[in-house]
Amino acid sequence: MDEHQSSPEAAATVWPGRPSPLGATHDAEGVNFAIFSDHATMVELCLFDSADSTEESRRIVLPEKTDQVWHGYVPGVQPGQIYGYRVHGPHDPEQGHLFQPAKVLLDPYAKSIARDVRWTSEIMGDDYDTSACAPLARVADTSFDWQGDRPPLTPWHETVVYELHVKGFTMQHPGVPERLRGTYAGLASPTAIAHLKNLGITAVELLPVHYHVDEHHLAMSGRTNYWGYNTLGYFAPDPRFSSGGPDAAVSEFQEMVRTLHAAGIEVILDVVYNHTAEGDHTGPMLSFRGIDNAAYYRLKDDRTRYLDFTGCGNSLNVAHPRTLQLIMDSLRHWVQEMHVDGFRFDLASALARELWEVDKLGAFFDIIHQDPVLSQVKLIAEPWDLGPNGYQVGNFPVLWTEWNGKYRDCVRRFWTGRGGAAGEFATRLAGSSDLYAHNGRRPSASLNFITAHDGFTLRDLVSYDHKHNEANGEGNRDGSDHNESWNCGVEGPTDDHAINALRLKQQRNFLATLVLSQGVPMLTSGDEFGHTQLGNNNAYCQDSPLVWLDWNHCPAQKALLEFTRNVLTLRRTQPVFRRRRFFQGRAIHGETIKDLYWLKPDGHEMTDEDWYAGHVQCLCMGLPGNQIEETGERGERITGDSFAILFNAHDEAVSFRLASRDHRVTWAVEFDTADAGAESRQFYGEESYPLQGRSLAVLRVVASGPV
């Protein structure tokens, strides 16, 4: 018998145990099991000898129920024990109760997964025993040696976020050992970390790594939920990404975090607390539905169907105190036991729905704000869901940073030539004060992005006018039709040199705009070197080279990667591009000293009439580095060089004049996206700078004074 497994004699004994903490908690003598269910009439603990067992070796009735929690202590059980539950109670769908003791259920507080779901006919059918096919938990060993691990604690204004998929980032990397590719250990490999460090990344945002289940229809068609937005286990790292198998997933994840921290890189998890993998009323009974359906899920008035604010079949009932506790306990577990540095909340508006309306002061946010652990980590909201009034960009409370969808759309419109009011473009570049300043938040409340996992890659954004999702098997009906993309004249790949050159320049334009905007930039992995998904803008079910990053780069891709590194270096070394406060200027002796200028190509400042003129395509953003008026943590005055960023989204070249006739300024050209490989050069302010069509240039003041 495995040393981790309990003997039948030991398992036959059960003591009352404790109702807290929930889940399976071990000590030197055994394990305490505790599970919430308000409406159950009996709960049986099922112990399995191995993950391959087709039935449990023993059932143990939990002897106590305290404050809606069923609990018992089993002497002799130790870490490694595999288990599940059978929960008895009324089967009364009209009251929302779906208890079926034939179903073996996963512990909602499982910290380790021993067996994935097996899609047999029994798992989907009513009243069939699922002991041979249900997902099973393992009592986790929590004795990890963190070796003095310390979180990087990177300030928000210095943060550069890099969204990646653990498998896709490393699966084809020749520098990652083959046995580690696609795993937590692969992401922690020296080669992977070197890329992140050389690029200038301070935080990785991991697509979901909580244990998830592939939807039944995907499994039946031979596909998978590659992105992982179908969570079932909120405390367990997904064993799919473990190089050492399911029993090593927890420690391998912890080792990954420890290694990334040692490199100064924070770990942010994309988390899905808005729905679970059990789907709609026709979905499988795997955990929550069979434990207490009426408590865990938002039900319609007839109690037989789910309210669905997510498009995934169900919505977790965050208004229930035990469901809310589950979320909070899960978050604290990942911070305290797994040492992660923050969270990005998928469809976060769904978590604010106490009844129907989105309530930004709902219980979820109140509890987060007063929590001494969670209030100190990075909190990022995807500020929308699919319910009524679900688009809530700018409406989240303090402590929260938001994916700024308005930034994405505005910048896309500008560089694709669709324009819009100049005022909005300028506001987005300056940190979106219209969205975040009203309640005391700062520019870091805006997480700026051009692309994300959901949608076109950056290369595809400039190569396709239309989505091409045929490989998903849904008749190209899935994915967004509103992409604000432009193919530069030809749909998809082409041998036309001029079009390919324009596409590369457009990618440079987008990257430079993103990195040098006020707020927190988020890059999508692969965009730095032109990764393509061949026009698929909804590759959620593609686990293949289509979505795995290809690290064999052509010269143009290498040049794009070097350009991205250089722009990120400029942001890191020049504080004027990462201000902590919004631009506001200051008054000295009755004169307003500006910390931000907006100029027309003729050198004159923008007027109110100019701001409201539609379709402005050329603009200069002046950033005087000596007017920042911010101090560092030790009280030192923050200052830096002065810059001008020239934007030209027009097809034709435009000349920019940058100084008055009575003032001589010498400028150094940091880079020009029309000629990214050119050496730095200087020119004088009384000269005009010729900016090519669809180009961006960054100029730095190196000398100034009167003529």
Image (cartoon, rainbow, N blue to C red):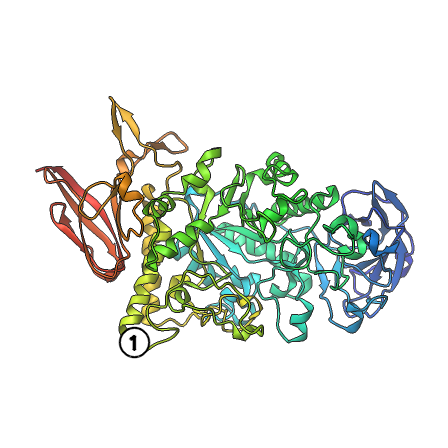
The answer to whether residue 428 is visible is yes
Residue 370: x, y in percent? 62, 34
Question: Dot 1, crowdedness within 10 Å: few (<14), some or many (≥20)?
Answer: few
Query: Is 47 on the left or on the right of 382, as rendered?
Result: right
Q: Residue at x 52, y 36 (%)?
A: 398
Q: Where on the picture, by quarter, is residue 228?
A: bottom right
Query: Quadrant of residue 493 in the image?
Result: bottom left
Spot occupied by residue 54 in the image (x, y as percentages of width and height): 82, 70
| Rendering coords of residue 535 (x, y %) | 45, 70
Q: Is residue 339 visible?
A: no
Q: Nearer the viewer, residue 258 or 461?
A: 461
Q: Name the one closer to the observer, 355 or 317.
A: 355
Q: Residue furthest top?
A: 589
Read off the residue under disc 1.
496
Q: Residue at x 31, y 44 (%)?
A: 612
Residue furthest out toward the bottom = 495
Q: What residue lies at 68% left-to-right and 74% top-to-bottom?
A: 220
Q: Quadrant of the N terminus?
A: bottom right
Residue 473 percent coordinates (x, y): 58, 74
Q: Residue furthest left?
A: 707
User: Label 1 sits on what residue type?
Assistant: Asp
Quadrant occupied by the C terminus? top left
66 on left or right of 232: right
Secondary element under disc 1, as helix, strand or loop, is loop
Left or right of 10 on screen, residue 350: left
Number of marks drawn: 1
